[in-house]
Image (tube, rainbow, N blue to C red):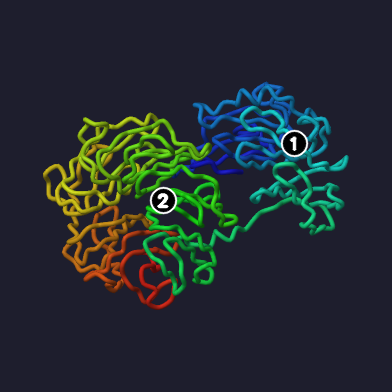
Amino acid sequence: MILYEDTLFVGGSFTSPRNGLAAFDLGLESRDLLDWAPSVSGPVLSLLSHQDKLFVGGGFSEIDEYPSASRLAAFDLEEIGWPLEPSWLQVAPPTTGSIQALAAQDNTLFVGGSSYSTASFGGQGVLAAIHILSGAPASGFNAHLNPGSAVFSLLIHGSELYAGGDFSISGGGSSQSHLAALSVSSGGLLSEFAPTPGGRVDSLTLIAPDNLQLFVGGGFQVFGGVERKYLAAVDLATNTVTDWTPSPSGPVTSLVEYDSKLYVGGSFVNVAGQSRSRLASFDLRTGSLTDWNPSAAGTVNALLRHESTLYVGGLFTALGGNMRNRLASIDLTTGMVTAWAPSLNSYVDSLAHNGSELFVGGNFTIIDNSIPRERLASFDLSTGLLTEFNPSFNNPVETILATATRLFVGGQFTTINGNSRPRLASFDLISRQLEDWSPSPNFPVFDLALSEDQLIVAGGFSFISSTPRSGLAAFDLGTGALNPWSPSLSPSLWSTARPRSLLVEPGVVFTGGLFSAQESPLGPGGGGLTGLLPP
């Protein structure tokens, strides 16, 4: 089984209600079986989603009566109906044995199996590397497994390919059995990894240390009592600052994680001693700075990922050498700036999406030189076109949160379409109308987050819904009523506590900003970052 967005794909030897492959929509409460119904002539033993494709391996001889889809096939998840990928139907697949393991990195698919010809996949045999775009064997890769070998499990970690199975392999003056680490690029044996299990290996998994780390960006230069300039990581198992010291040269305003990488936006011009203008990324497996360097000509205030596209908002006027006024997108598959190029006349502070629309907030009033959009706009995610949604805010929008049916907006504004809505408001996205809900915080709202059926609000306010709250509050999404939840945050530098950012995880609400807190991941008085029980 694998999960792709909200779809669960299942493979096996079943013949009812689907034949070898099935898909379920987990976005629906009913978890409906989808109509997609490819006909597979034998068992499906491995599944992998990568670059919007579903790769399928097994012991089958054909799919949908295509004999060229033997033992290995790919489906295009971007096309309507998820058809078989045409370029992969031109590959000469193995006609015996089975594919039992799949792994992918960038544009290469790694395939492991048993009992098929050593001539398969251009002579690479039971452990092969295949170019994803063409379906052809990748040149230069040869693992040199001994005859009769079988590979049952594959795992990629950085530049290393780990293979488990029932095999022996020799190279570089050493040999390994059942478990080996190989070079991703060449397939050569990495002799320093030599566990030598006493029997076949069926499964591999990696428990990555970053699964227990909280990454924090901001304007700080000391964090948890140690020097950490603008970007740091906290080990949540020990509640201590890690040794990771990327040291960007200026404040970090936005963080996004995707595909084992951390994408960082802000006002810095170098990171880890290397030139990186307002955008950078790190490999979360190693903590090292990657080569990705799109270079923004101006501060980046907001990052948002949708599928494999990274949306970027801020004050910049160019990105990746292309003219882009305050809003742009980057294809994370290629790392390149896309052709999408709306032009805004002032800065973007916030981005949100609900799967179909991209919502943009800030201080702009004109888009594409002539179209009025006062501080909030939306774009169709499938076409990139500006929608007709056109509310008018009298002051900047700082934060947006979108669901399928509602849009919550916070900021410095006091009116929307001439109606009084101080600093926090909501829209019905079905009718596209401003809702009556108006909690009226007395100072700006900086961030919004969801915790199950509660809306959490962070800002500089000391009153909201005519009730004292020290910069944090929660509302029932169904009724709009203020929740009794009232964390105690003390002012730091300001006359009121000013939490500016929120992150909600199961059982905890993290908030960062200008305040001090007694119960902090960084110990008593670990001001500026704290973890709280959710409402």
Q: Position of residue 371 (x, y in %)?
A: 22, 31
Would you say 108 lies left or right of 506 here?
A: right
Please name the residue that numbered disc 1 is placed on.
Answer: 140
- Mark 1 surroundings: few (<14), some (14-19) or many (≥20) residues within 10 A: few
Q: Label 1 is placed on what type of residue?
A: Gly
* Residue 52 coordinates in the image, percent (x, y): 54, 35
Quadrant in which the C terminus appears: bottom left
Residue placed at 57% from the left, 34% from the top?
A: 53
- The front one of 490 and 488 is 490
Q: Say which element carries label 1.
A: loop
- Is disc 2 surrounded by few (<14), some (14 to 19) or many (20+) residues within 10 Å? many
Q: CA distance from mark 2 to mark 1?
A: 37 Å
Identify the secondary structure beneath mark 2. strand
x, y percentage for residue 225? 44, 74
> Residue at 23% of width from left, 58% of height from top?
481
Which residue carries the number 2 mark?
Answer: 265
Give the side of residue 294 with respect to residue 154, left or right: left
Identify the residue at image location x=18%, y=41%.
Answer: 392
Mark 2 / mark 1, whichever is N-terminal? 1
- Which image quadrant: the N terminus? top right
Q: Work out whether residue 348 or residue 163 is closer to the camera in this orientation and state it.
A: 348
Name the residue type under label 2. Answer: Gly
Please give the label number shown on residue 132.
none
- In this rendering, is residue 453 above or below 94? below
